[in-house]
Amino acid sequence: MILDFGSQYTQLIARRVRESRVYSEIVPHHLSLDEIKAHHPAGLILSGGPASVYGRKAPRCDAGIFDLSIPVLGICYGMQLMTHLVGGKVGRSTKREYGRAELSLIERSLLFRGLPRRMPVWMSHGDRIDALPPNFHAIAQTANSPAASIEDKRRNFYAIQFHPEVAHTPSGVKILQNFLYKICGCKPSWDMGSFIHEAEEEISRQIGKGKAICGLSGGVDSSVAAVLVQRVIGKRLKCIFVDNGLLRKNEAKSVKTTFKNNLKLNLKCVDASDQFLMRLSSVINPEKKRKIIGRTFISIFNDEAKRLGRVDYLVQGTLYPDVIESVSLKGPSATIKTHHNVGGLPKRMRLKTVEPLRTLFKDEVRRLGLKLDIPEPLLYRHPFPGPGLAVRILGKITKERLDRLREADAIFEEEIRNAGLYRSIWQAFAVYLPIQSVGVMGDERTYEDAIGLRAVTSADGMTADWFEFPHDVLKLVSNRIMNEVKGINRVVYDISSKPPSTIEWE
């Protein structure tokens, strides 16, 4: 169990633990002692965070966790809080440590079993340990931190001033695994097979003999959720696919073929493209676009649900990052954005939500999909926003602009696949820019719009960097778009990273 104190890396800790085949969950730092005990955790990890333990609003956990007779690992702020709560002293460091540092081991410890005496680690702190708590001793140090790692071996309390979860600490995974396996006694036994078994039991318990519906978008999350639920309740799951006219080229046809014919889902397809386009016809503001699309989808989905008679449950492809980002459920981590499938269900529908993927990360969902025999090309498709191409057209949305963007986007994807680069890129897409510029085509002057190309690399979409294409690939894409897409006479490539930019333009 990981107590979240607001670190930007808290999700990474959970991922590293799960990658070590031990199940983990992130919980708010203020979770009550009774709730913690009810979960019977094999161990606790206290995450990092931006606060100082002496700050007026510094997040605290119940000090009773140190009386539960289970191992505890404190990371960065978690180390300082542990020190403070069990009788040590934390103070401001005269020299802050940010970035790379060299860790030197002072004594042998289970936490560093099998690791070299010196190793690079990643630091990010301004406080340091001035006085160790009773029964603790230092087991590692850096040039600026005489107690960069401490332990109370008898009570299985360990703490480290650096971040083992980040890639900049090369031995970090091994340190976490030592805590998991050698100190907590966990076995590397959690995998997608065990998840499927547990999820099916939970779905059966939750839905019973009831009926459920699922809004199928054609994306990875809703697809995996639908296939998993259908394994349990069969035809009592009805999937509804709404074609909003804002999809990629041939998307609607592909969804029907894949889900109805190949995966044998009980699928109803609704063409509502005219309705969406009419409501979006004069809208420029991206947030208004999103709200109109969301309301229209819910209205159409609600009407279709009523035609099915009594339905008790709504299946959603909510993922773990959705839950964390939308609700700030896990403590003081900042709320980044509100997702359409978390807390967005209209009360009038009176449906109970079934979210079988809400404890999984995206990469875990893909592995689950492979176990469920979902075609690999579908599972590894680049992310596509809920509002679709509406937020990839800057300015007004028209059928003409949508058609141009679809063609440009299809050309971009086709050439990326031809070059064997698709799986190397987290997300790639075209953006319609209503910025007219002068060009020359066939000895004639043109004054037409532009297409922006965007491709990024990322581990999870939270941060991203622009993809460095071979120049010949970009040249080919640009030439094809300007020759094959009427009304476009300029192509540009976006070389912005996230942050400060977002991946999508709107």
Image: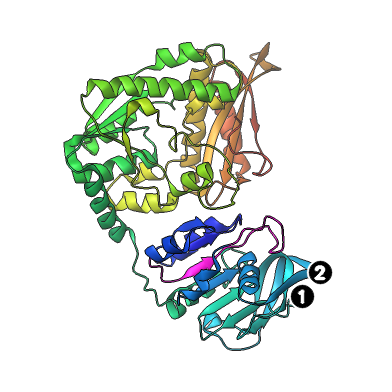
Q: Position of residue 269 (x, y in %)?
A: 29, 24
- Residue drawn at 26 percent across, 25 percent down: 268
One can see residue 420 in this view: no
> Residue at label 2?
95
Q: Nearer the viewer, residue 94 or 432?
A: 94
**Is 363 positioned to the left or the right of 289 in the image?**
left
Residue to which mark 1 is pinned: 144
Indicate whether residue 24 is drawn in magenta.
no
Q: Do the residues under discs 1 and 2 have CB atoms within 8 angstroms?
A: yes
Q: Main secondary structure of the magenta part?
A: loop
Q: Quadrant of residue 76?
A: bottom right
Quarter of the image containing the C terminus? top right
SS state under label 2: strand
For the question of whether residue 195 can be seen, the reply is: yes
View extreme (bottom): residue: 107
Counting residues from the start of the chain, the first of labels 1 and 2 encountered is: 2
At which x and y percent is residue 47?
57, 63
Q: Is residue 197 left or right of residue 118?
A: left
Q: Which residues are magenta?
A: 40-60
Q: Where residue 80 sits: x, y (%)?
A: 65, 69
